[in-house]
């Protein structure tokens, strides 16, 4: 096993049939894409891998995309998938680690004890020449005992409170620089352009190279170069709470384990004309 965050395709291939290993495909499309990743998973996936739909295992009572589900919703979904909090959950996505860290964060927040991301993702598995299969996958139901840590999630009200009353909190935005600086329109229609007041910009793609996180030294240097004080509290955001999790995992890898995620992110903040922003 590579470390506490990742496994290699070789390791997974050797342990694919271990009783305690559960593999999930957590692919999700970018807002500009209309890719049916569930269909692609049906057509070909890692043997035994189940599809974890971040847009369905979500809070469906809001018009915001893929918001964190209620604990009961998550519990029902993973119970059906045959997972307990003690299974080793290996997550991959079919993109460039766009959505696997969001699934990692979700499992983490509900108390999964052993979570890994497949290095190189789906492409890394294919390039290694390992077996694939098609069709649905089922496992015997299991009981997942939730240990929810809601303090890792931020609401709009908490962001406003931090803006007005806590100057030490830093907002770090994972969107592309052009969006952060309001040079290009948001991909979701109707949203204002700009960013949270005083936010720093660390585009999520800066941390990733071919489906793998860069070395911790490089990640540390990237945050520091963008003016992030790694000794102060951090709240991560992005377009819709998806790639903010890429930053959360990157921060955890370099020892900043208390970072929080603004789940509504710009999909929520950018839709409300009454909220402050900078360009």
Image: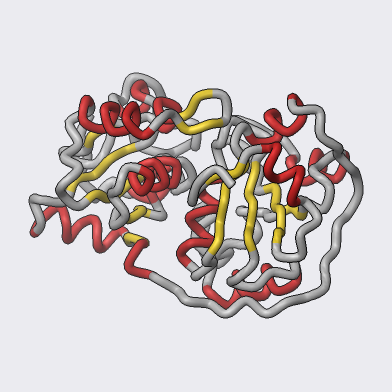
**Residue 218 in the image: above or below residue 147:** above
**Residue 258 in the image: above or below residue 87:** above
- Colouring mode (rainbow / by chain / secondary structure / one colour): secondary structure
Residue 55 as seen in the image, left or right of residue 216: right
Q: Is residue 270 visible?
A: no
Number of on-image labels? 0
Residue 129 as seen in the image, left or right of residue 60: right
**Residue drawn at x 36%, y 53% as measured from the top left:** 261
Where residue 163 sits in the image (x, y, percent)? 15, 52
Q: Nearer the viewer, residue 15 or 58?
A: 15
Q: Nearer the viewer, residue 186 or 251?
A: 251
Where residue 230 sits, quadrant-wise, is top left
Where residue 35 sits in the image (x, y, percent)? 71, 35
**Residue 277 in the image: above or below residue 78:** above
Residue 240 as seen in the image, left or right of residue 45: left
Location of the C terminus by quadrant is: top left
Where residue 158 sits, quadrant-wise, is bottom left
Where residue 8 sits in the image (x, y, percent)? 63, 38
Q: Is residue 246 visible?
A: yes
**Residue drawn at x 67%, y 68% as measured from the top left:** 78
Q: Nearer the viewer, residue 97 or 57?
A: 97
Residue 278 as seen in the image, left or right of residue 44: left
Where residue 37 sits in the image (x, y, percent)? 73, 41
**Residue drawn at x 75%, y 70% as measured from the top left:** 82
**Residue drawn at x 73%, y 77% as measured from the top left:** 142
């Amino acid at each position: 096993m590579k470390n506490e965050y990742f496994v290699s395709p070789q390791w997974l291939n050797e342990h694919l049939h271990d009783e305690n290993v559960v593999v999930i495909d957590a692919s999700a499309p970018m807002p500009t894409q209309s890719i049916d990743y569930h269909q692609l998973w049906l057509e070909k996936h890692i043997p035994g891998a189940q599809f974890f739909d971040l847009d369905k295992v979500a809070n469906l009572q809001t018009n915001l995309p893929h918001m964190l589900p209620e604990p009961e919703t998550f519990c029902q979904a993973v119970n059906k998938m045959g997972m307990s909090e003690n299974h080793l959950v290996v997550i991959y996505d079919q993109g460039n680690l766009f959505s696997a860290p969001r699934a990692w964060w979700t499992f983490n927040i509900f108390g999964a004890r052993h979570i890994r991301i497949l290095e190189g993702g789906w492409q890394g598995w294919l390039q290694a020449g390992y077996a694939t299969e098609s069709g649905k996958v089922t496992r015997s139901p299991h009981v997942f005992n939730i240990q929810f840590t809601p303090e890792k999630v931020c609401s709009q009200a908490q962001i406003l409170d931090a803006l007005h009353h806590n100057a030490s909190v830093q907002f770090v935005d994972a969107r592309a620089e052009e969006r952060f600086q309001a040079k290009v329109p948001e991909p979701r229609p109707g949203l204002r352009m700009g960013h949270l007041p005083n936010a720093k910009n660390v585009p999520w793609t800066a941390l990733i190279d071919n489906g793998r996180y860069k070395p911790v030294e490089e990640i540390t240097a990237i945050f520091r170069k963008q003016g992030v004080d790694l000794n102060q509290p951090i709240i991560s955001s992005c377009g819709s709470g998806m790639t903010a999790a890429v930053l959360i995992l990157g921060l955890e890898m370099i020892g900043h384990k208390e970072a929080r995620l603004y789940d509504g992110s710009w999909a929520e903040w950018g839709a409300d004309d009454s909220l402050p922003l900078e360009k």
